[in-house]
Amino acid sequence: MRLSRAGERTTARAGFAVKLAGAGRSALPAPSMRLFLLRRFITLLLTLAAASAVVFVVLDVLPGNAAQTMMGPDAAPEAVAELARQLGLDRPAWQRYADWVHGLLQGDMGESYAYASPVGELVAERLAVTVPLALLAMVLASALALLAGMFAASRHNRTGDFGTMALVQIGIALPNFWLAILLILLFAVRLQWLPAGGFPGWSAEDGGGFWPALQALLLPAVALAVVQGAILARITRSAVLDVLREDFVRTARAKGLSRRGALWRHVLRNALVPVLTVMGLQFAGLLAGTIVVENVFALPGLGRLVFQSIANRDLIVVRNCVLLLAAMVVFVNFAVDVLAALIDPRLARRAG
């Protein structure tokens, strides 16, 4: 009888601890959340301002004649001087920076020197390829990572864990451009299931459509997702193993919850914060780092536009594209911070 009562008291204390843990993760008071969001938003604005200043200084202020660079070393001095006047290079640097920022705030990125068209239109056309490609790659990488990480953690130090981590290590070691070439040889050349490159467009009027466009993005998305998913799988496994050692997991199991139920209902949510942080960094990297895969598959994305603009010495396009990529990275990190605070409100409370 004493042992029974002692066990009941222990179970009651464990249940009370679980309730306290749940209360600690309850909704964050509105003032604390508003303060957290305000600080993050101010940080976002300051980061964007610093990034724009750095980009402008590197491309427009450092020693060197931007007009001469754009026209090439063999251009006539009169033509270089005329282009410098058109670009406003004869004005003070602070005035040119202010005009550039003012134009950006109004949605005016200027006109491309090489393409003779507004930079905003060029960027919008390329984002219609890069953003869906990054999203598709991120979805594939996340699904692969969560399944592999949870599977390996649930079979810690067993054959399933060792085999999964061996495959993950191979995925990390594979260069994405080399994997892209292998995918083309297998699925496009040998099996002829998917196109080897190019992009037909999202509109059926232009000879494309949703399904043809998705088929064109599938192989490059897989090439990007394998490496990112392998990295994320290791992070997921480590985070899940850390949570599995917590007292509330043992308490949930002692109350009769199955191992699978504990994993998916309790462990995964508590392990999501570090995983979500890495996901945000990877998505930002996918937006800014698809240049190699886009060139392998001849996709007209933003990375390919930057590559071509550098080759064409189109510094106006390079300047705006680099700032846009930096802005997307900053906004993704801001969104990740907010989502992490919603999953675990204690993060916002500590920051406040």
Image (spheres, rainbow, N blue to C red):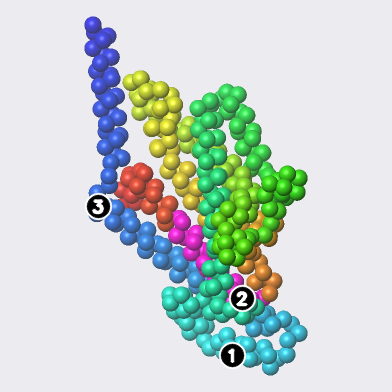
Residue at left offset 67%, top offset 76%: 313
Q: Nearer the viewer, residue 301 or 208?
A: 208
**Magenta stretch mostly in which secondary structure?**
helix
User: Can residue 139 be seen at all in this image of the molecule?
Assistant: yes
**Image quarter for residue 134?**
bottom right
**Residue 322: x %, y % from top left:** 56, 67
Vertically, is 212 above or below 264? below
Kind of residue sitting beneath label 1: Arg
Query: What separation in Å lies between label 3 and label 2 (alpha carbons)?
Result: 45 Å
Query: What separation in Å lies between label 2 and label 1 (alpha carbons)?
Result: 15 Å
Numbered circle sitting on residue 30: 3
Query: What separation in Å lies between label 3 and label 1 (alpha carbons)?
Result: 53 Å
* Disc 2: which residue: 315
Q: Which residues are magenta?
A: 313-333
Residue at left offset 68%, top offset 90%: 79
Which element is circle 1 on? helix
Residue at left offset 43%, top offset 41%: 272
Q: Looking at this view, name the residue that lies furthest to the bottom.
A: 78
Q: Does 52 appear in magenta?
A: no
Residue at left offset 29%, top offset 57%: 35
Q: Tag 1: Cα neighbours inside 10 Å, few (<14), some, or many (≥20)?
A: few
Which element is circle 2 on? helix
Q: Nearer the viewer, residue 279 or 3?
A: 279
The answer to whether the residues at label 2 and label 1 have Cβ atoms under 8 Å apart is no
Kind of residue sitting beneath label 3: Ala
User: Can residue 63 be seen at all in this image of the molecule?
Assistant: no
Vertically, is 14 above or below 27? above
Q: Earlier in the sequence, mark 3 or mark 1?
A: 3
Q: Tag 2: Cα neighbours inside 10 Å, few (<14), some, or many (≥20)?
A: many
* Disc 1: which residue: 85
